[in-house]
Amino acid sequence: MEMASFGKILIVLGLGLVLFGALFVLGDRIPFLGNLPGDISFERGGTRVYIPIATSILLSIFLTVVLNVVFGLFGRR
């Protein structure tokens, strides 16, 4: 592996970590994230169960688009 391609991989991984960290920091400020129709939440006794199906699908679509753009910029497909 050439050093230039290794450097590009490190840049992409670093940007991915920054975006992932920003999602954790700003996640509470996004009003609809986690409260979409299709997210299942119920409570029995002292146990609460939350299954974010719709949020997971939305994040999957978003990440697919972002990764396709990033890989397209680096010429990989």
Image (spheres, rainbow, N blue to C red):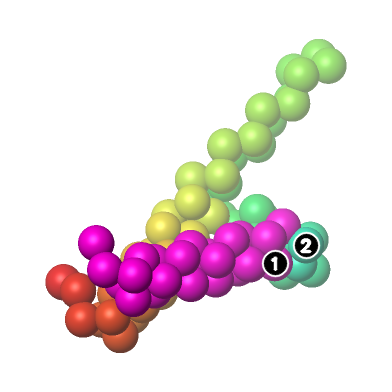
Query: Which residue is at a point 34% across and 70% down the rendered structure image?
Result: 3
Q: Quadrant of the C terminus?
A: bottom left
- In the rendered image, residue 30, in percent from the top left (x then y), is placed at 72, 69
* Location of residue 38 with respect to 7 vertically, above or below: above
* Location of residue 50 with respect to 10 vertically, above or below: above
Q: Is residue 68 visible?
A: no
- Disc 2: CA contacts within 10 A as few (<14), some (14-19) or many (>=20): few
Q: Secondary structure at mark 2?
A: helix
Query: Which residue is at a point 34% across and 76% down the rendered structure image?
Result: 4
Q: Using the image, tell me which numbered label, if any, was put on residue 46.
A: none
Describe residue 50's horizontal placement relative to residue 47 as left or right. left
| Residue position marked by numbered label 2 in the rendering | 25
Query: Which residue is at a point 68% across and 60% down the rendered structure image?
Result: 21
- Front-lying residue, 26 or 4: 4
Splitting the image into 4 quarters, where does residue 26 fall?
A: bottom right
Q: Gap between marks 2 and 1, in whole Å?
A: 5 Å
Q: What is the span of residues highlighted in magenta in the rendered image?
A: 1-24
Q: Is residue 43 visible?
A: yes
* Location of residue 5 with respect to 45 vertically, above or below: below
- In the rendered image, residue 69, in percent from the top left (x then y), is placed at 33, 80
- Disc 1: CA contacts within 10 A as few (<14), some (14-19) or many (>=20): few
Tell me which amino acid carries mark 2.
Answer: Val
Q: Residue furthest front?
A: 3
* Residue 5: in magenta span: yes
Query: Which residue is at a point 78% across and 62% down the rendered structure image?
Result: 25
Tell me whether circle 2 and circle 1 mark residues in contact (CB < 8 Å): yes
Q: Secondary structure at mark 1?
A: helix
Splitting the image into 4 quarters, where does residue 33 fall?
A: bottom right
- In the rendered image, residue 47, in percent from the top left (x then y), is placed at 76, 19
| Residue position marked by numbered label 1 in the rendering | 22
Tell me which amino acid carries mark 1.
Answer: Ala
Describe residue 34's horizontal placement relative to residue 11 as left or right. right
